[in-house]
Image: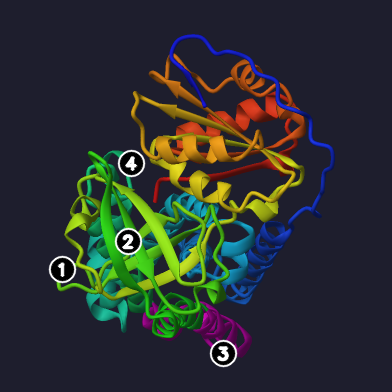
Amino acid sequence: MTTIESRPRTATVAAPQTSRRQPPRRVGDAAALVAGVGAGITVAVTIPAIIALSWSAPGALASALGIVTAMLGTYAALLSILLMARLPFLEHEVGQDRLVAWHRTLGPSTLLLIVAHVVLTTWGYAQQVNATWLSELVSLTFDTAWMLPAMAATLIMVGLGVMSWRRIRNRMRYETWHIAHLYFYLAIALAFGHQIESGSVFFDAPFARAWWIGLYAAVAAAVLVFRFGAPIRQSLRHRLTVRSVDRADHDAVHVHFRGHDLDRLHAAGGQWFSFRFGTRRWWWQGHPYSLSAGPTSTSLRITVRDLGDQSGALLSLRPGTPVFIEGPYGAMRMDTRTTDHVVLVAAGVGITPMRALLDELPPGVLADVIYRVSAEPALLVDELRAIEAASRGQVRVQVLAGTRRQWPMTPDLLTQLVPGIANADVYACGPSGFTDSVHAAARQAGVRADACHHELFEF
């Protein structure tokens, strides 16, 4: 294994003798198309209500815009929930990190549309009765059926929107953020009665009403089946427990699990689970951890660095502690490669899924590992060194010891470290800035888009 402390050294990797190419994955494109069609139908069902407005009366334009923003805002909120519903085909093909990114991208638009609906609708009614905006808002809230729960839903969404601001979210504990997000489900439920009973879109409109109720029912069913039912069934089937806990280094621990028929999970190196430990303190909260070794039919392993939340107290887990799991999730698997040469690029704790990927490296496939660390000894370096020594040249590990400024992920650096990288698959894992820079550098170095795979370590 090469440890590089100042300037990168070049090394020649034998070109792969064979390659295999999988057909491009279209699940994400299909999902986007379905979401777009749904948005189109949602807008279409508002047309009769908009036509029925008295356009010569004051406030008609504001009322029309209020109708459209209400429907699109709620549709976007339902879509946000669906992205996080752990739908197996999306999780397997798209990857949970990308779904989270889409969810975060959709969030601000959802909030903007909902707030715009409140402002515009109130303004429209205020113009009709020649009242002030604030007085009309109070009147609508307390005098209209189901409006009080709807206003509570709006305030919850605004509060969550403020908490989602990166500067605030980064200061929050994972547990706090997780619990706060559950209130989003409550907000969506509180808004439903107001929409169906008071929304002009649904007056004498059986198709619109059926469409809206069907959307709510489909999202609710997805959440109940895949977020709650599937994990419970899975945990009861495999009866996972803690086998042992030991230190990986001064601020990280290995947690070993044992269970029954774990091969039926169809987990793979590079993937992750959400773990709930059956203790009085932790049974109610799930934490995402990547596998740090290839799964077997009877065992799993995670390696967790102390980040100040639950991860810092895992050493206190006792053997035999029951564990509830959701997963596996993540599309960064060895079977997504398109060539017989893989380059695994990791920073910090992002090395854990890369370590597991190495356990599933097929014969004849070359692997270059590029591991950027602040200093040595680094997490899992001893295991990487042992894998390299036993691989007979199939695996080569290079550790970049130093700061981000010393080792920026650039096309020149990647091609110096791995001269044949243009004809390889590149896997990257770490913080978003790191994975983005690796992906961009790999593309500039000639790596095809379908040969770039990454997983974010930010949730």
Front tag of 3 and 1:
1
Q: Is there any visible trace of residue 119 in the rendered image?
A: no
Q: Which residue is mark 1?
A: 281
Q: Whole-percent x and y of residue 201? A: 53, 78
Q: Mark 3 and mark 1: span between their CA atoms?
A: 51 Å
Q: Which residue is mark 3?
A: 204
- The numbered mark, 3 or 1, whose residue comes first in the sequence reads 3
* Nearer to the camera, 21 or 228: 21
Amino acid type of the residue that numbered disc 1 sits on in the rendered structure = Arg
Q: From which residue to which does the magenta span run?
A: 192-218
Q: Secondary structure at mark 1?
A: loop
Q: Is residue 211 above or below residue 436?
A: below
Q: Badge 2, how many Cα within 10 Å: few under 14, some, many 20+?
A: many
Q: Is residue 167 above or below residue 265?
A: above
The quarter of the picture where residue 132 lies is bottom left
- The numbered mark, 2 or 3, whose residue comes first in the sequence reads 2
Amino acid type of the residue that numbered disc 2 sits on in the rendered structure = Met
Instruction: Say if mark 1 contacts mark 4, CB within 8 Å.
Output: no
Horizontal arrangement in the rendering, residue 83 relative to residue 12 (left or right): left
Q: Which residue is mark 2?
A: 157
Q: Which mark is residue 166?
A: 4
Front tag of 2 and 1:
1
Front tag of 1 and 4:
1
Q: Is residue 172 above or below residue 227?
A: above
Q: Badge 3, how many Cα within 10 Å: few under 14, some, many 20+?
A: few
Q: Secondary structure at mark 2?
A: helix
Q: Secondary structure at mark 4?
A: helix
Horizontal arrangement in the rendering, residue 343 relative to residue 241 (left or right): right
Amino acid type of the residue that numbered disc 4 sits on in the rendered structure = Arg
Instruction: Say if mark 2 contacts mark 1, CB within 8 Å.
Output: no
